[in-house]
Image (cartoon, coloured by chain):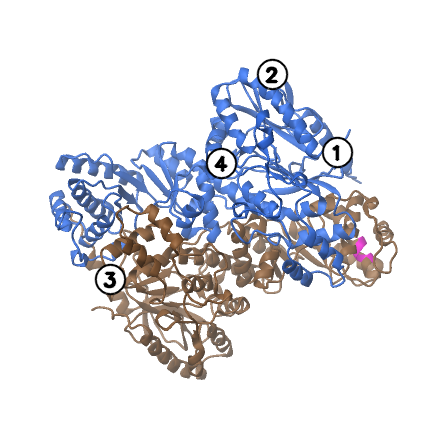
Chain colours: A blue, B brown
Amino acid sequence: MSLSPPKYAADVAKVKSEIYEADGIKHESVDSKVTRVAEATRMDGSRDENAAGDFLASSHVASNVPASMLPLNPWITPMLTDFYQLTMVYAYWKGMRHNDHSVFELFFRKNPFQGEFTIFAGLSECIRFITNFRITENDVAFIKTRMPSETSQDFFDYLLGLDCSDVIVHSMAEGTVVFPRTPLMRIEGPLGICQLLESTLLNLTNFPSLIATNAARMRLAAGEDKILLEFGLRRAQGPDGAMSASRYAYMGGFDATSNVAAAQAFGIDVKGTHAHSFVSAFEGPEQLQDRSLGECKDFWAVAAEKRAQLKYPAANIGELAAFVAYAQAFPDDFNALVDTYDSLKSGIPNFLAVAVALHELGYHARGIRLDSGDLAYLSVKTREMFADAAKQFGIDLSYLQIVASNDINESVLASLDEQGHSIDIFGIGTNLVTCQAQPALGMVYKLVEINGKPAIKLSIEFKKVTIPGKKHVFRLIGMEGVALCDVMVADHEDPPVVGKRLLCRHPYIDRKRANVTPSYVIELLRPIFIGPERRVAPEPSLNEMRDHVRDQLTLIRNDHKRALNPTEYKVSVTNELFTFMHDLWLEKVNVAELE
Amino acid sequence: MSLSPPKYAADVAKVKSEIYEADGIKHESVDSKVTRVAEATRMDGSRDENAAGDFLASSHVASNVPASMLPLNPWITPMLTDFYQLTMVYAYWKGMRHNDHSVFELFFRKNPFQGEFTIFAGLSECIRFITNFRITENDVAFIKTRMPSETSQDFFDYLLGLDCSDVIVHSMAEGTVVFPRTPLMRIEGPLGICQLLESTLLNLTNFPSLIATNAARMRLAAGEDKILLEFGLRRAQGPDGAMSASRYAYMGGFDATSNVAAAQAFGIDVKGTHAHSFVSAFEGPEQLQDRSLGECKDFWAVAAEKRAQLKYPAANIGELAAFVAYAQAFPDDFNALVDTYDSLKSGIPNFLAVAVALHELGYHARGIRLDSGDLAYLSVKTREMFADAAKQFGIDLSYLQIVASNDINESVLASLDEQGHSIDIFGIGTNLVTCQAQPALGMVYKLVEINGKPAIKLSIEFKKVTIPGKKHVFRLIGMEGVALCDVMVADHEDPPVVGKRLLCRHPYIDRKRANVTPSYVIELLRPIFIGPERRVAPEPSLNEMRDHVRDQLTLIRNDHKRALNPTEYKVSVTNELFTFMHDLWLEKVNVAELE
């Protein structure tokens, strides 16, 4: 038995038409949630025959590229690669194998954060990189200095002429909920160029997927009704560690960022209050040169009077002056950081004095930010103090919000939820943007087929053996509208069909198998870059990708998504693929000789 | 008692001349190691009166900047900031305080990796950022959309006119071994502009310092005689997560990187072998279209013959073909990844067959790379197999090297060292570049003085209280040529003098104090950017900074540097500073009222 050879663009049409049959059945059998998700999956290419024409927008590969298709960072060039890619390509070229037809898959083996799901992100950057792939004279001049002196000029000419016009990429949509071992991207084409893409594609998907997953997990832990702010710029791993974090945290479910450049570049909402230094910069009202606010000639006096009425003798006068100064600048967006001296004895009373004064003048303060101490206790206490002040002054202060922002991570969110708290908004920095709980994802890029013959990467650890051959991935949805399992199908096999029972097998453990009858079938790997036809799928907007994450997550059962001891999601192969892989393994690995 | 007001550039000259007096004494009392370090400290500015003229190279700030002074990443602009910096500056501007004279310090509170030292890095990027600081019309157009609608155009005009021409920066040299709480950078100037620098300076120093420290720790764990390669591109946190990692790992003591772009941009040596996919791409000699190597018509036959003589029947024939193909391309740089099938039964025998064949033809293979399994055992076993083959063929193979590269971190290095191994070269990726053991450093930026008055940031945790006022930092070196302690000295105090006893006190604990008589005094904070004079210190080369790290580390006692339970290095303040800080604290914090 052998898997079929690649069929290039022809098979795109075949799989698409097969999927459309499945679609036909779906409309009679699935509920509205699935329909909504099906709509959302359009972003990775239309699932509609009428739209097939514009599914792949016309675009020149690596020439006349509009600015909107350039990578976000100028370091993203073919030189952002491991040197061994160049040495391997030289060895392939020298052995006349650089044009062998190859199929690579990009996947990971283990979900991050001890969880059972991952959000796939970074695809847009990958496609921009692929579209613009070109090695320059300058690059070659550098490469020459690092290659054996006898290296032929013909090899450098080959590098100079390389682009991705012979490469075909299939991919899951950016923002898809994904699982271990299934190909997230499949890259086909000449061995030389496909090999050269490896390191860059891994770099461009690993961290984005990790951040998006981290953000999605924090969103699940916080609940849909909380506002989540990304505050990580200062602790991020470099400038675009910060930019990527802002972008992919938003994709994963955050609402806004503090990072102005990210807000400007990506259209994300931007939020912020003030720092401790702002408070430290005031010693008292003598530093308020102008004490007015709008019609009010002496806003300081009004605030000071309110504070006297609130009766908190320990409240710091410099802090009150700082709050007054800040409220003068932002009377309708006054948010105070309250822990410079003592949150309960100074910061909140001072805030309330200013908030009540603003209220009387017809403004609305925004709220406070807690940045130290026991956030659950302090938030509950703060809410009580808000209520007491409202009562004392006979006004409604229910619009005041509480932001919390000190070393928050997924387990702090869960623990706060358990204890009970009054926080409306979480500002999360270090733990989000550096993914402290697990700062790297193990995305890999493996050769699965060469010249039509499946390739297998063996390993002493059987679970590290790659699943050989070019394949397709389908998500099988059950009667209740949730995902039952993902199944990998060999290229020449028929795709799963709605209403038809399919034996799905665990890729490594022969006892684990299930008959699955899907009510709906989603094809996950879709054509996205067709070099030979100079076509590339349109890039979804960041908001579309963010919506896709949210919609996708509703398809996944809660027990797969929970933080503690989640259930493993079933990732399976067809019986044929299982048998093929195991036979190939037995054939390639010698039986140990014990003497 | 109060600390003196800022004296700007004038005090540079004063402190410099005092230090030169100390220098005069030093030459009679310190050993050559200290002299060497003194030489190295020149990179942060000359310590030589004759060189005082060219200490600060003439350069226009923010105009006619040469490309070599531009930040390495285009995201490094004033917009790479937290939004609250802009809102605070608006509040300062509205309250007419934006031109108040301020002094900020950049420091951290806790060494990373449970260690007792840190390498300060990222300064060059900070200075490039400061030199080029300018808010554009485009930036202002964006900021306008996020500010209250009534914000005056005058404020935006103020932003458009901002640069660092009134800012003075003192800093420790990049690559200095530093300790908690001492200012690494001191930024003085108008409150508005100094506040706007915060987030960007933190982003530009946090990760570089973390990576450089991580690399320096790995260098200490591996020992000076090993070669350390940075292999982290694919797992790094984004493209310049990777670029920064390559740059600062090199600074911290690594020898080379796999990242071609980093090698090209920073002049770092680049290394690499091949991947598993290269081996998987070969099934046997039928894929070798040309079997020759130089004069040898059938190099495959020679290698196959050697393998038959080596008698390892389980060695995979596809792997041998892959090695032959790679050796044909790199006969004098042949490095084989040996674990695609089985390191001992297949990879190493196949490598040896090719290496012996190369040797007979007058070439020299480089060695092998182990990428899985028990690295200590496998490396020892590999060395034995090398020796056996050398004996069998009667040749010298002692030049063969062993590279190891699977999930290596600082504790693996220590554990390998304990077990005994035969590895020459370590390739380190994820753990190095993402700083898995602690992916973020807590650098902070605090206001310490405003309009000549010391500012203090209070905190319920006393150890988080900032040390108020503008100050200087000196490293006091003892008779044996190692650092005794760092001491912070108030701006108006005299600097420590060689041979003169100085009471050094722990900043927080009044019982902890010591009389220190230095044999040599190093001033750590040095002028680096003098905006009013349009002068900026020359940027050292990456290699100079790398040398500085190594030299600096020799000044620090081994017990401070060891991985397990290191001794805390003494960071102290003068008696005057101690008393001043504690008095200020008592004055600012109310006595609790218990009723």
Identify residue for label 4. A545
- In primary-sequence order, the first of circles 1 and 4 is 1
Amino acid marked by disc 3: His
Residue at 38%, 82% (x, y): give it: B21
Magenta residues, as a range? B353-357
Same chain letter for marks 2 and 3: no
Residue at 56%, 46% (x, y): give it: A204
Label drawn at residue A499: 2
Q: Is residue A519 left or right of residue A510?
A: left
Amino acid marked by disc 4: Met
Q: Crowding at label 3, few (<14), some or many (≥20) Cα neighbours within 10 Å?
A: some
Identify residue for label 1. A5
Q: Nearer the viewer, residue A100 or A394?
A: A100
Give me the chain letter of mark 1. A
Same chain letter for marks 1 and 2: yes
What separation in Å lies between label 2 and label 4 (alpha carbons)? 30 Å
Identify residue for label 3. B582
Label drawn at residue A378: none
Where, quadrant-wise, is the N terminus of chain B in this rendering? bottom left
Amino acid marked by disc 2: Gly
Asked whether the viewer can see residue B570, the reply is yes
Q: Is residue B397 left or right of residue A241?
A: right
User: Pointer 2 and pointer 4: residues touching (CB < 8 Å)?
Assistant: no
